[in-house]
Amino acid sequence: MIMQNILDMQLDESLQLEQEKGVITIWLNRPESRNAMSVKMVESIQQIFTAIENDTSIRAVIFRGKGGHFCAGG
């Protein structure tokens, strides 16, 4: 299963992943910084997209932010 492959990767600890059927939700979990992206977070997100790019069972990826904010900055 693709989700297990993603969970086995060394992802940034400030990302949380959920999968329900063909939808992956990526939670940004740095509420103390209003979920501002770090370099490690961006690298981990790139790893996730590389892992799922050829998986036709994944129909959508949703980004959400913990703590009442989506993502501050840039």
Image (cartoon, rainbow, N blue to C red):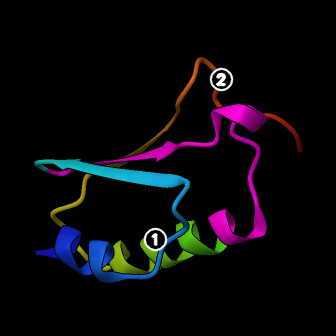
**Residue, x 64% and y 75% (percent of image)?**
43
**Residue, x 10% and y 48% (percent of image)?**
21
What quarter of the picture does the C terminus occupy? top right
Q: CA distance from mark 2 to mark 1?
A: 23 Å
Residue 41 falls within the magenta-colored stretch: yes
- Residue 42 visible in the snapshot: yes
Instruction: Indicate which disc residue 69 carries.
Output: 2
- Estimate how packed mark 1 is, as few (under 14), some (14 to 19) or many (20 or more) residues with alpha carbons within 10 Å: few
* Left or right position of 59 against 11: left
In this rendering, the label closer to the viewer, 2 or 1:
2
Amino acid at the residue labelled 2: His
Q: Is residue 33 above or below residue 8?
A: above
Q: Position of residue 30 (x, y in %)?
A: 64, 42
Which badge, 2 or 1, comes first in the chain's sequence? 1
Magenta-tinted stretch: 22-42
Residue matched to label 1: 49
Q: Nearer the viewer, residue 23 or 56?
A: 23
- Estimate how packed mark 2 is, as few (under 14), some (14 to 19) or many (20 or more) residues with alpha carbons within 10 Å: some
Q: Position of residue 52 (x, y in %)?
A: 33, 73
Q: Position of residue 61 (x, y in %)?
A: 38, 49
What quarter of the picture does the N terminus occupy? bottom left
Instruction: Indicate which disc residue 10 carries.
Output: none
Q: Quadrant of residue 50?
A: bottom left
Instruction: List the single residue furthest toward the front.
Output: 32
Q: Nearer the viewer, residue 29 or 53?
A: 29
